[in-house]
Image: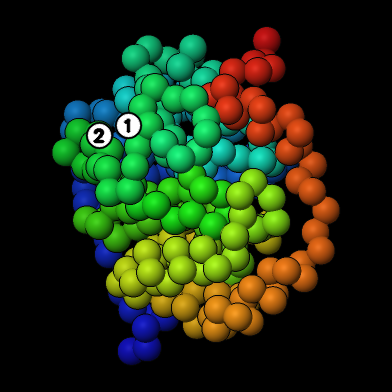
Amino acid sequence: MCAMMSTRIPFTSDFFFRQLFDSVSSTYTYLLADLTTKEAIIIDPVLELAQRDSQLINELGLQLKFAMNTHMHADHITGTGYLKKLLPNVQSVISSKSGAKADKHISDGDVIRFGRHEIKATATPGHTNGCMSYINFEQGIAFTGDTLLIRGCGRTDFQEGDSRTLYKSVHEKIFTLPDNFRLFPAHDYKGQLETTVAEEKQYNPRLSKDIDTFVTIMENLNLPPPKFIDKAVPANRECGLFDIPK
């Protein structure tokens, strides 16, 4: 059986996973929990949908421990700050290299625990200096933020972006995971939900190339600036506490 068809690792019975979507910014938010202790984390929440997320968390009887970001976003305002107001005892989390405020700043190799489960923070800079991918080895999954998208990758033309750094991050930190690991990005613009290490190594039209070709591709994308960058970046430096919905 070829690598692309290899069997994925099944979730353990005490592990909760939910993928949520924001149609405005095409952002995926991920809710993970230990079903025994009910401790939960949320990854890349969106400000305007924080009430949706908090309602779901309450309905499921979960206790949100950490509200986390993969990086300081430029295309939407994070919901971490608002979730801290909506739910008790939540701590915001982001990379120490992000330039953003948070209750807990993490570095490469740090482990975030919720119940008996954990995710490992792995520094994958290149889109921004503070980009982190979050890996759960037991469940065979990784949350790659904007570093690696489905058949794409994050831009490198603003916010400390560097194409060679991003390429090395992906090839050294993500493509070295087992081929059957499921990868969940921060965005998708074509309706796809997830991918795998094996798929992206073979089919990613940018990152399957050599590094010099990749740099040339990234230098010639000629994309307009993110629509909300002037509003999102300053707000996200403050944990997304600007413009909280009434």
Left or right side of 114 for 196: right
Determine the residue positioned at 32% across, 68% down.
177
Using the image, tell me which numbered label, if any, was put on residue 20: none
For residue 220, above or below residue 87: below
Classed neighbour count for the residue bearing mark 1: other residues with Cα under 10 Å, few (<14), some (14–19), many (≥20): many
Q: Report x, y in % for residue 43.
A: 45, 39
Q: Do the CB atoms of the residues marked 2 and 1 lie less than 8 Å apart?
A: yes
Q: Quadrant of the N terminus?
A: bottom left
Determine the residue positioned at 48% across, 44% down.
130
- Element under disc 1: strand
Q: Report x, y in % for residue 90.
A: 37, 20
Determine which residue is flagged by label 2.
114
Q: Can residue 187 be seen in this view?
A: no
> Which sits in the foreground, 242 or 90?
242
Amino acid type at mark 1: Ala
Amino acid type at mark 2: Phe
Q: Report x, y in % for residue 14.
A: 21, 43
For residue 56, above or below residue 213: above
How far separated are the C-alphas under marks 2 and 1?
Answer: 6 Å
Mark found first going from the N terminus, 2 or 1? 1
> Which sits in the foreground, 123 or 112?
123
